[in-house]
Amino acid sequence: MPLTNPVEKPVMSREQIVSLLEAIEDLHDLCQMYVGIFSGPRASEVMGFQWKSWTGTALMPYGTTYEGQFYKGRLKTKASKALIPVPEPVRPVIEAWRKLCRDPSPEALMFPTFGRGERKGQAVPCWGKNFLRCRIRPISRKLEIPDRLVTFQVMRRTLGTDMQHHGTLKDTQGALRHASIKTTGDVYVQILDESVVRAVSSRTAAVLGDWTAPVEKLGLKGRNIRSVPVETQDAQSQIAI
């Protein structure tokens, strides 16, 4: 047999997650990390969420982003079109960010950045790597959390790993929206939505413990807060497409 190196599949510890969340002082950043850590969407989905994606209890992806462009209706698999359950402790953070953000209209992006060049002045999708590199890793490095752990893929893997203590295999498949349960196991079962929500909520409560995000005290810190022009409905649709 040839010698091969095992593929590393790191996860974040509870202590690392809580210490990182406690250190974030910007509500936009905290909301984005809450969604990534506790709901486990792919990076391309996080950056493409629009406010119409938020139902109050779940997130619905309407497309994905790639290199700062939004691709309407394009998702990794058919299973990816399912609702993403949002644990109860995460919901107030999303609502607090919606109240503070410049444009909470249905077609507007939840986590936009400002375009350059031909898209100057428009709200456009942020690059996931840029967000983590510029906004989160300066914080995580002070906490001595390795960069390799601060990725949306690791957040998603950590959720899947932790879920085994809070739900069934079918709950994990439902939370991660895998096309085949072979990705999370080798047995196919019907997904129960209420069971999935209970499982991800249980895991979130176990990670956060008694800590609650001080969303009422957070604003925008160290962020470009130039006003986003109020777009007409047609202009918003063009940005989304």
Image: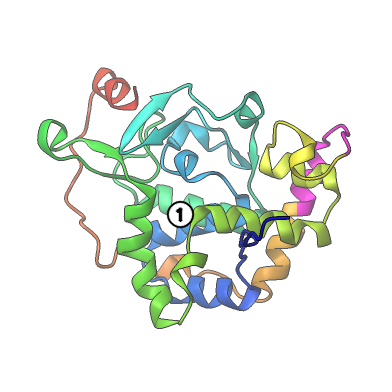
For the residue labelled by badge 1, is the local secondary structure a helix, a strand or a loop? Answer: helix
Amino acid marked by disc 1: Gln
The residue that appears at 38% across and 69% down in the rendered structure is 137
**Identity of the residue drawn at 83% across and 36% down:** 192
| Residue nearest the viewer, comparing 234 with 184 | 184
Above or below: residue 81 compared with residue 186: above
Please report the residue visible at 12 percent of the width from the left and 30 percent of the height from the top. 118
Q: In the image, is residue 188 part of the stretch drawn in magenta?
A: yes
The quadrant holding residue 220 is bottom left
Quadrant in the picture for residue 170: top right
Relative image position of residue 237 (x, y in whole percent): 32, 21
Q: Rate crowding at label 1 as few (under 14), some (14 to 19) or many (20 or more) other CA atoms within 10 Å.
A: some
Assign the N terminus to one quadrant of the image. Answer: bottom right
Magenta extent: 187-199
> Would residue 140 be visible to someone looking at this image?
yes
> Which residue corresponds to mark 1?
32
Q: Does the magenta segment cover residue 54?
A: no
Q: Is residue 92 visible?
A: no
Q: Residue furthest front?
A: 1
Q: Position of residue 61 (x, y in %)?
A: 53, 32
Q: Residue at image x 28%, y 26%?
A: 239
Q: In the rendering, at what x and y percent does residue 128 appear?
A: 39, 49
Question: In the displayed structure, does residue 212 sit left or right of residue 125?
Answer: right
Q: Nearer the viewer, residue 212 or 224?
A: 224
Whether 230 is drawn above or below 185: the answer is: above
Relative to 25, 146 lies left or right: right
- Left or right: residue 5 versus residue 182 is left
Horizontal arrangement in the rendering, residue 153 relative to residue 206 (left or right): left
Q: Position of residue 2 (x, y in %)?
A: 67, 56
Q: Considering the image in quadrants, where does the C terminus appear? A: top left
